[in-house]
Image (cartoon, coloured by chain):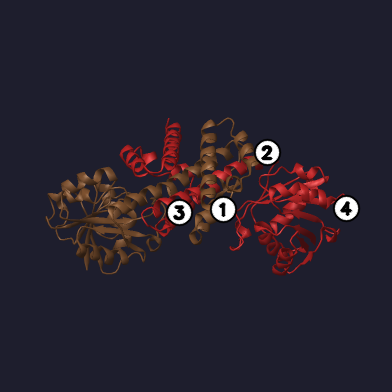
Chain colours: A brown, B red
């Protein structure tokens, strides 16, 4: 039985705790958060205990998972060091933070990174979520793999360097795509139109690349070299030079990428 | 019974023909395409006849649907005019082309625009597809509404001006999002990583905005004002000034949009 303490009660921790609490051969000992009420609520949803103070954190866990914001990880590790055994295995769940941040406080450290965007309201389905793992020691990595496999079939080993690269790619695939949805909604709003008109298209565009390579399903006036439509669109954005700028840059990049491939 | 002739055998026509062929109270009389073999194949998949030559197109249809590429619509309309009755109802299926292109050849014209991205390989589910309609005459618009309702519950009236706006928005929501997936795949490829790592994230990002407003689910270093991560990402893109440029522009736009809303 893998005994686990989870630190944090944000978007990820609040999805991870219930998933771990029902995973086979896993015992979620405690959750801890600076905000007692949040810790208490999360413990309730995951049917486990919670620690009121950091010094109440169990010293008996096989694994301590730090699932807090990137900038708080180092500080939490420093505090945690004072209350748990020196040879404890400690991981964080961040895509952006090197594992070595934990190496300052612990010799057995690693990363347990579920690559997904989480919200408080929408229940995450861990079976669909890639679990990206790293650890300073091979035996710890095997332990993390077993744990990850108990909540997802998609388990990968990934180095700090690869994870950093992946994080940049995720900004394009997720953050920038979502911002394009924001812009689309704004453009529609100018004529009183609802994003509902485009929601099915947004979903289908994402579905399309589940089985295809995105460059093979690129559509639109830029890839077609349809200059009259490109010109008309820019004219329609005349009162929004910021959007014209983005439109021009991305259209040109689509065309350059297309001609690089075909040449 | 609504008698229909469909002109075209591309991505949209090849999805629309089978959908119309099984719609209640609809009779797909013929499909026509310059390429005989394509027309024949499509007729087979939709269990209808096909016209070998444009002069073989039936004069008996209640509606002629021109589902060809934007730039060919005008030419097809001109040819069609010579073979069907002058008072025929003729529509096109384009998001980008004004309905008035048909007005040069016909007095009863309109638009029958399924707003979705289509591929030859993936069967479209019309029940999820918004059908955007317009017609010069109210009685024709009602006819188109009845027809559209027979394949989708999502039927909207939309003017040329609104449709033009919608088309720009769709470029951001669909074409530019897909290009961000292309870029993500490229960035991953630099370290030998697969897009499979990001496919679930891409899908969840699109799902997230099916129920939420995209600005409420924006995540990432830009919206958090996480300058160290932004700097690190730019450094990682050092050998790709083109991607740095896009990264900077979109990150700044996310931040500006965010601060406009909060101020």
Q: Are the residues flagged by discs 1 and 3 from a single subunit?
A: no
Q: Secondary structure at mark 1?
A: helix
Q: Determine the residue positioned at 47% across, 55% down.
A: B203
The residue most toward the front is A263
Badge 3 is on which residue?
B202
Which of the 4 quarters of the picture holds residue B251? Answer: top left
Mark 1 near mark 2, Cβ–Cβ under 8 Å? no
Q: Residues within 10 Å of mark 1 (few under 14, many from 20)?
A: some
Mark 1 near mark 4, Cβ–Cβ under 8 Å? no
Chain containing the residue with disc 1: A
Chain containing the residue with disc 2: B
Figure disc tally:
4
Please state which of residues B78 and B98 is positioned toward the viewer in this rendering. B78
Please state which of residues B249 and B52 is positioned toward the viewer in this rendering. B52
Which of the 4 quarters of the picture holds residue A49? Answer: bottom left
Q: Are the residues flagged by discs 4 and 3 from a single subunit?
A: yes
Badge 1 is on which residue?
A200
Q: Determine the residue positioned at 15% across, 49% down.
A: A105
Find the distance from the CA under tag 3 to the CA under tag 2: 31 Å
Please state which of residues B27 and B153 is positioned toward the viewer in this rendering. B27
Q: Determine the residue positioned at 64% across, 56% down.
A: B153
């Amino acid at each position: 039985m893998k005994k686990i303490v989870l630190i944090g009660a944000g978007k990820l921790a609040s999805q991870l705790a219930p998933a771990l609490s029902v995973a086979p051969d896993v015992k979620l000992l405690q959750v801890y958060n600076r905000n007692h009420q949040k810790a208490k609520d999360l413990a309730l949803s995951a049917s486990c205990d919670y620690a009121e103070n950091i010094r109440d954190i169990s010293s008996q866990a096989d694994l301590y998972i730090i699932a807090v914001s990137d900038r708080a990880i180092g500080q939490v590790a420093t505090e945690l060091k004072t209350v748990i055994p020196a040879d404890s295995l400690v991981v964080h769940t961040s895509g952006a933070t090197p594992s070595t941040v934990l190496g300052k406080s612990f010799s057995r450290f690693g990363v347990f990174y579920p690559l997904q965007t989480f919200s408080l309201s929408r229940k995450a389905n861990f079976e669909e979520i890639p679990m990206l793992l790293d650890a300073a020691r091979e035996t710890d990595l095997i332990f993390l793999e077993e744990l990850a496999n108990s909540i997802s079939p998609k388990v990968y080993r990934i180095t700090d360097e690869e994870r950093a690269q992946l994080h940049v790619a995720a900004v394009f695939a997720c953050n920038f795509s979502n911002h394009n949805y924001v812009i689309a909604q704004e453009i529609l709003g100018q004529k009183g139109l609802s994003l509902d008109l485009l929601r099915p298209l947004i979903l289908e565009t994402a579905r399309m690349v589940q089985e295809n390579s995105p460059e093979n399903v690129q559509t639109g006036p830029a890839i077609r070299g349809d200059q009259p439509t490109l010109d008309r669109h820019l004219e329609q954005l005349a009162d929004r030079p910021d959007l014209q700028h983005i439109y021009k840059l991305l259209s040109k990049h689509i065309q350059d990428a297309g001609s690089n491939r075909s040449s």
